[in-house]
Amino acid sequence: MITNKPTILNDNSPARIIPRNHRNLTGFIHGNNDGLYSGFESSLERDALILIEFNTSIVKYISQPRSFNYFHDKKDRKYTPDIFIEYDNGKKLYIEVKYREDIRKDWGVLKPKFKAAITELSDEKNTRFKIWSEKEIRTPLLKNATFLLPYRHRSFEQYQLEMLKKVISRFHETTPEDVIRICSSNLETRAEFLNTLWYALSNQIIKADLTRPLTMKLPIWM
């Protein structure tokens, strides 16, 4: 049973402050999210935020975004999902990040929380609630995002980017190994081209299926 209207997300302030915790990993990630720091309470939440920061179709996200009030076991209670994200197509998503083992172990406590959020959000257009576990988060995409994100704002030579695009556009698809080899025979210059290639992949200027492990033989294309 839901007792009151939840706190509506109307600014970038978290609905709940993350406490310091000596048992779990806590901290903040600073990204392109309007210059904001996003907090996390576990390594799994940190990894979820890395995936979100890497996803260029996400235009906004915030940790501890909004609280839902509900009544359970003869008490008024409050539930705050871990993350809110908004996509460039207008869709919105509230996310609870939990290990699968914890979901199974604590399902009796978690179920009314999740039901409160799902019920309230059913009246809001293009808005859903989802649970992300390590199955959804700890994938090859996470490894690729962790590797490529530092390259997103690296300096690079514009002529190298243009040459990479020109070479790659000649093929239906090719590989980093072949492209770098075509661009230069000098080992030092090849390293510079590789830096530019990682920049281009991180910013999706050059395409690849990053749900697969990133290697020098991964197919890439324009």
Image (spheres, rainbow, N blue to C red):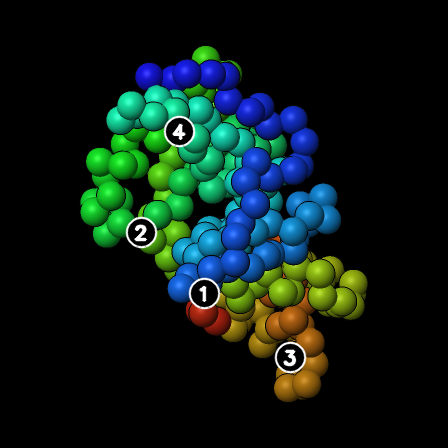
Task: Give the Cα separation between the discs numbered 1 and 3.
Answer: 41 Å
SS of the residue at dot 3? helix
Q: Secondary structure at mark 1?
A: loop
Q: Which comes before the other along the chain, label 2 or label 1?
A: 1
Disc 3 vs disc 2: Cβ atoms closer than 8 Å? no
Q: Nearer the viewer, residue 95 or 56?
A: 95
- Position of residue 205 relative to residue 66, above or below, is below
Q: Is residue 138 visible?
A: yes
From the viewer's perspective, tell me whether residue 222 is left or right of residue 174. right
Q: Position of residue 5 (x, y in %)?
A: 50, 17
Q: Determine the CA span between mark 3 and mark 2.
A: 39 Å
Q: State the residue position of label 1.
A: 22
Choose top left, top right, bottom left or bottom right for residue 202: bottom right
Q: Are marks 1 and 3 in contact (CB under 8 Å)?
A: no
- The residue type indicated by label 4 comes to Arg
Q: Is residue 63 above or below residue 178?
A: above
Instruction: Residue 143: tell me if it is visible.
Output: no
**Amino acid type, callout 2:** Tyr
Residue underneath mark 3: 191
Q: In this view, which residue lies farthest toward the right?
A: 158
Between discs 2 and 4, the one toward the N terminus: 4
Counting residues from the start of the chain, the first of labels 4 and 3 encountered is 4
The residue where tag 2 is placed is: 99
- The residue positioned 65% from the left and 71% from the top of the image is 195
Quote the CA–CA distance across marks 4 and 1.
Answer: 25 Å
